[in-house]
Amino acid sequence: MTRWKGAMCLLFLGTQAGCGQGNGTSGPGELPAAGTDSHDAADAPRATDDFGREVPWTDAGDTSGTAQDTTGETGQDTALADSFAEIREDSATDPPGETSQDTSPDGAAPAQADPALWGPHEVGMTSFQWFDLDRLRLVPTTVWYPAIPMGQPRASYLVILQGKAYANAPRDPTGAPYPVVLFSHGFRGTAVQSVTFTEYLASHGYVVVAMDHSGNTLTDFFSDDETVAQVALERPNDVAFAYGKIMEFAAPGSELLSGMVDPTRVGVCGHSFGGYTALVVAGGLVDVSGAQAACAAGSPSDIFCDYVGYWPAGTTVGLSPQIPGLLAAAYFAPGGYSAFGDAGLAEVDVPSLIFGGTLDDTCPVDVEIDPIYVALPVPKGRVVISDASHMSFTNICDIPLAQQFLADYCDVAGIIGEEEGFAIMNTLTVAFFDRYLKGQAEFFGDLSQGFSDATWGGAAQVTTEW
């Protein structure tokens, strides 16, 4: 169990700076039913996904005019695209500074932006201090969204990390309402631990909502196993609460995010402990007695064994009611296979994309990633990044002092470069969410079909069952 406990013991870090916006203190709003918000894309034609549910449909056949910014402060470094040159060499780019997304002449939906490049939108970032009165629980939340900067400063995270987003920039309603993706951080992590990913996703036309899980953040220095066990139960409810609040703040008449979120197109993702959280949000169930028995039997997947003993035997851990409009889930280095078991993971009822790293000793591929992947229902995809460690899915190792406290996680011999790791993570996750939240599948085929069980670009192995 020390694998997870050591992973995020960042005793020296402060909270994000330069990004405060609103302090929402109202109680939790009821989760709106899909289709009830006045900003739903009610007139959009629908298609059926692999689970038989209706999903948005768009015409992504013509991308000849798609604007892509590949240089300058608003663009993604061209090295991110170079990582995929062996797969696709015809990615068109426009001059630096172009951030508008083209539409077809007949006014059809925007063409799909290339997932391997920084998206067509500038990004805004704001934060809220939401409080759940029902649970008497603080849920600080950071939100990234398509924006139109008007002189706002760049966002700063964890005091030292500089982002590409603009703090509190006005919203960009061009493609609204946008799909929303909920992000759950890792053990003793933070909502802003993976900003290279969350900002990138927002640039592709998503509202990204990441919450701090109180009691298990980088400032919760002295929480014991019993406290963490309780937080494990609260984490999925934090995600659902943040979803309900973002729907309130995107309602007509709100200032910053009015009309920005489509409640019928929702995704969830998370890293490590947040990957476990995302699995629960996606429908996964934990049979507590079964999990306790697996730990007693010495299961190699022991990441939860210090905690399940505090949960009442004979109960089931899950999220009820589930988040309406949830259509897809991604998991970055998740743990908890023995807690769920095959039966609990079979309850996940949305398409899944799971990532692991060959140098990850916290949630090893053979102990956590592969068993979880095998147990998940189809459609699903698995990405194993060569030479990635547990923290390769975060920006934590960008903090200079992290080298002192997280040497086992940051100073890993042969570890993949951060830029290359995020290139794979960002590209595939955007392609995945574009497919299942936007109905845009042009690049999805390039990035998944035909690459099963093969080394992809020399850096990742992709297995898919779509």
Image (cartoon, rainbow, N blue to C red):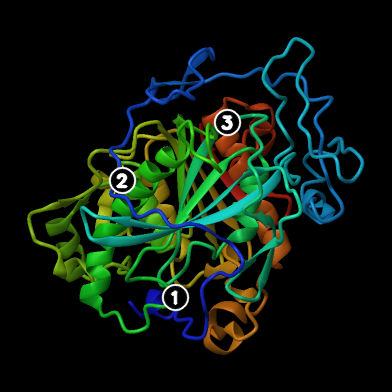
Judging by the rendered image, the residue that carries numbered circle 3 is 435
**CA distance separating discs 1 and 2:** 29 Å
Pick the front one: 349 or 33: 33
Residue 187 in percent (x, y) is at 40, 69
- Residue type marked 1: Leu
Pick the front one: 92 or 257: 257
Nearer the viewer's eye, disc 3 or disc 2? 3
Judging by the rendered image, the residue that carries numbered circle 1 is 218
Residue 61 falls left or right of residue 82:
left
Asked if the residue under mark 3 is in contact with the one under mark 1, i.e. CB atoms within 8 Å, the reply is no
Quarter location, residue 248 = top left
Is residue 359 in sight in this rendering? no
Residue 228 in percent (x, y) is at 27, 71
Quarter location, residue 413 = bottom right
Is residue 422 in sight in this rendering? yes
Say what secondary structure mark 3 lies in.
helix
Q: Is residue 271 above or below residue 426?
A: below
Mark seen at residue 345: 2
Say what secondary structure mark 2 lies in.
helix
